[in-house]
Amino acid sequence: MSTNTRLVHATPDQVWAILADGWLYPLWVVGASRMREVDGDWPERGARLHHSVGTWPVLLNDTTEVVDANPGVRLDLRARAWPSGEAAVALHLRPNGGGTEVVLEEDAEAGPATLVPKPLRDPALRWRNVETLRRLAYLAERRP
């Protein structure tokens, strides 16, 4: 798994509120460009986000599914972006002073992306997820 960590100047509950609002997904996830639908029971196990990836006019519709969730503590996802494949994503929220240490782990789990050797996959994921965590922090730190 590629791992990124960021201290967010917001409580775990404030960070969780962003993760629990599926409609905000394309605002913090690099590569997600729009939401088409959010299952009503998001972020419970089995719930899905129906999103698009890419840049208009080349958009691919796919889904992200909750594998496991512990509100305010952890969210495990299976993100799909075919034809490149599927990824396992885990977000851990840990109280740190008045803020939250957010740890984001991600790796390819199925599809052509798994053919890329891990030493080549990890730097690209790490680079992408620095921005993903930056966006998540902006939302959590500035949301009233």
Image (tube, helix red, strand yellow):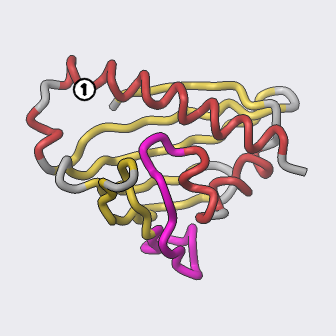
Q: Is residue 119 left or right of residue 46?
A: left
Q: Does the magenta stretch include residue 38?
A: yes
Question: Which residue shows up at 63% across the image and 36% down it?
Answer: 135
**Where does residue 101 sit, x and y in percent of width and height?**
68, 30
**Vertical position of residue 114 compared to residue 50: above or below:** above
Question: Which residue shows up at 50% across the image and 60% down it?
Answer: 34
**Vertical position of residue 41 compared to residue 135: above or below:** below
**Where does residue 57 sit, x and y in percent of width and height?**
34, 55
Q: Is residue 96 left or right of residue 92?
A: right
**Where does residue 76 sit, x and y in percent of width and height?**
46, 53
- Total marks placed: 1
Q: In this view, does 95 lie to the left or right of 104?
A: right
Q: In front: 57, or 109?
A: 57
Judging by the rendered image, the residue that carries numbered circle 1 is 121
**Where does residue 68 sit, x and y in percent of width and height?**
47, 61
Q: In front: 35, or 20?
A: 35
Question: Which residue shows up at 39% across the image and 53% down it?
Answer: 56
**Vertical position of residue 54 compared to residue 3: above or below:** below
Q: In front: 25, or 87?
A: 25
Magenta segment range?
A: 29-49
**Vertical position of residue 144 compared to residue 49: above or below:** above
Q: Is residue 23 left or right of residue 36?
A: right
Quadrant occupied by the N terminus: top left
